[in-house]
Amino acid sequence: MDEKLKIFYALYERRKSIREFSDKDIEKDKLERLLETLRRAQSAANRQPWHFIIIEMDDRKNLNDCLTKEGFKNAPIIIAACAEPQKAWIRKADVVNYAWVDVTIAITEMIGAATAEGLGTCWIAAIDPARVKDILGIPSYIEIVALIAIGHPLNPLLKEEKNRKPLEEIIHYGKW
């Protein structure tokens, strides 16, 4: 395998959900690259139906009360990933709105970039969206997809083993 491919796949071997963060700040240049990754992410018909709110530690008093895990409260950055369904592409055949798909793609690409930068992330879905919207002043027509905690892992050397289904259970060739 080519060396660049090895590096690429090693990135996804390293990626894991981090639930405990050190108090070290995220370097400004790293954060800027992560935000650029969000901006450049692909979306259906290039509609980009998203908004991302960067919440730093100083602005988190009320938001921290919404977080279910203590470790998330130490993450130096939390990003509220939001969808604007009115701006999204809609598949004609079944009228599926792609806003959440597009936001999820952007978040996933940013999580990969954060891993490459040596940062840890965790997708936080266990929230009360109405309460978070109120705290962050998010308009009613915007939907919160998730909060993403980002920071330096407290224990970066811990290896997280996940039980994954074998390929035979999830991959289908030609037909179901």
Image (tube, grey):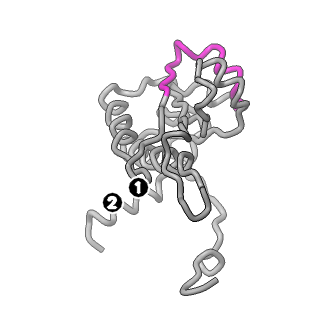
Q: Residues within 10 Å of mark 1 (few under 14, many from 20)?
A: some
Residue furthest out toward the bottom: 174
- In this image, 146 relative to 153: left or right? right
User: Taking 107 as reference, is 169 left or right?
Assistant: right
From what the image shows, is residue 112 above or below residue 25?
below
Q: Is residue 45 magenta?
A: no
Q: Amino acid at mark 2?
A: Ile
Which image quadrant for residue 28? Answer: top left
x 53%, y 58%: residue: 91
Give the image location of residue 105, x and y in percent.
47, 50
In the picture of the structure, the residue carrying the numbered disc 1 is 11
Residue 89, placed above or below residue 31? below
Q: Return the x and y of residue 155 as percentages of the image width and height.
A: 54, 39
Mark 1 residue type: Leu
Could you tell me residue 74's position as x and y percent? 58, 25
Front residue of 87/74: it is 87
